[in-house]
Image (cartoon, rainbow, N blue to C red):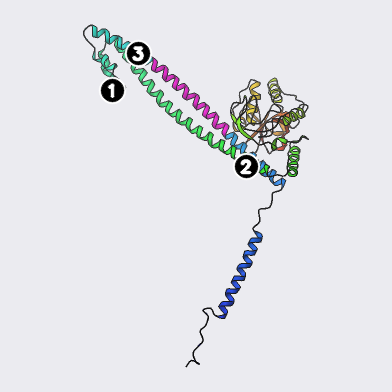
Amino acid sequence: MAAHRKSKQSPLGGSAVRTAATLALASAATATLFEGSGHADPRPTTAQVKAEVDRLYEEAEVATERYNGAKEKADQARTAFDRLRDEAARRTERLNTAREGLGAMAAAQYRSGGLDPAVQLALTSDPDQYLERAALAEKAGERQAAAVTAVRRELAAISQLRGESTGKLTALRGHEAELRRQKAAVVGKLAEARRLLDRLTDEERARYEAAVAARNGSGTSTRADNTSATAGTAAGSTTGGITGGSSATARADRSSGAGRASVNAPNSRAAAAISFARAQLGKPYVWGATGPSAYDCSGLTQAAWRAAGVTLPRTTYTQINAGQRVSRSQLAPGDLVFFYSGISHVGLYIGGGQMIHAPRPGAPVRIAPIDEMPFAGATRIG
């Protein structure tokens, strides 16, 4: 019987063992393959870094113009709110004066032995009760009725002012929230651009600066992009922002632009705007700034035309509608030239295919060719 007993077999048959072995070898090979391919992403080339930095700066400028628009609306809402608040205070003062007059009448009547019910009503501390029952004032004398009417008028005016103030305050808070969002967007884009630039080696940095200088039509190396942009308030500027650059770069840009593109302005106002813009060459770019120590792109054009006696709106996408549209072939010195599909950048045309503009953080106010960016349109002021 023992001789005929089947021998005990392994849980895995021969074919199963071979399959398991094959899977194990395949797994090992796959693991080896992934380990070999698990390397870091290839280092971007200088051209790729430049393209990405340019994109980030363009997006930051779009956010800057939105910030400028939100700030303009917030300033307007704040001014309106303050005006309403001041008017309410003046009305309240007149109300108190009218009530004092009614109090004097009441005191005189009391001394004479009686207090008219209408006067008692006018002196109530509950305005709603007073307004609901104000018809009783008709029982008062002519003088008393006039005084009560004045109180009623002031109460109604104050109530209306308070309602309007509430609406303006709500709008102001909404604009301030938008300001914070756009500021965060600008700061984030600029910080990302700085991180990319900081990864460049010295040799890559030199190639990057040469490419930027070539695009700007200048032999001057743009060392400003090597300076980290910092958040803060530019001395003398109207608002805080992101700035960068160096005094050496500022001097270089001021001197290199001084003799370019002679101006034959079509009128005295255009000449005054260009003269002002030339005097700003070398000053730093600060987003949200309108001078006198720093500018962003639309802040510079607004300040230049303000010096010529013309008030422009604050943002690029409103400045383009501030005058008569002209084609590129019709450009004359003093025209505003706009760039990118979103109308996110503006410069002041000075003739000869050149403009004065505030380019971006790290690049101060300078003269540059208008073909260095995608042309979007032009407007003639005045």
**Mark pair 2, 1: CA separation:** 62 Å
On whether residue 16 falls in the magenta region, the answer is no
Kind of residue sitting beneath label 3: Ala
Q: Residue at x 57, y 33 (%)?
A: 67
Q: Determine which of the numbered discs, if any, sits on residue 98 in the image.
A: 3
Q: Determine which of the numbered discs, if any, sits on residue 192 in the image.
A: 2
> x and y percent of residue 87 in the render?
44, 19
Q: Earlier in the sequence, mark 2 or mark 1?
A: 1
**Mark pair 2, 3: CA separation:** 63 Å
Question: In the image, is residue 65 above or below residue 123?
Answer: below
**Mark pair 3, 1: CA separation:** 18 Å
Q: Determine which of the numbered discs, if any, sits on residue 129 in the image.
A: 1
Q: Secondary structure at mark 3?
A: helix
Q: Residue at x 75, y 41 (%)?
A: 206
On the picture, is 80 further left or further right than 54? left
Kind of residue sitting beneath label 1: Gln
Q: Secondary structure at mark 1?
A: helix
Crowding around mark 2 (Cα neighbors within 10 Å: few <14, some 14 to 19, many 20+) is some
Disc 3 and disc 1 in contact, CB within 8 angstroms: no
Q: Which tag is nearer the camera, tag 2 or tag 3? A: 2
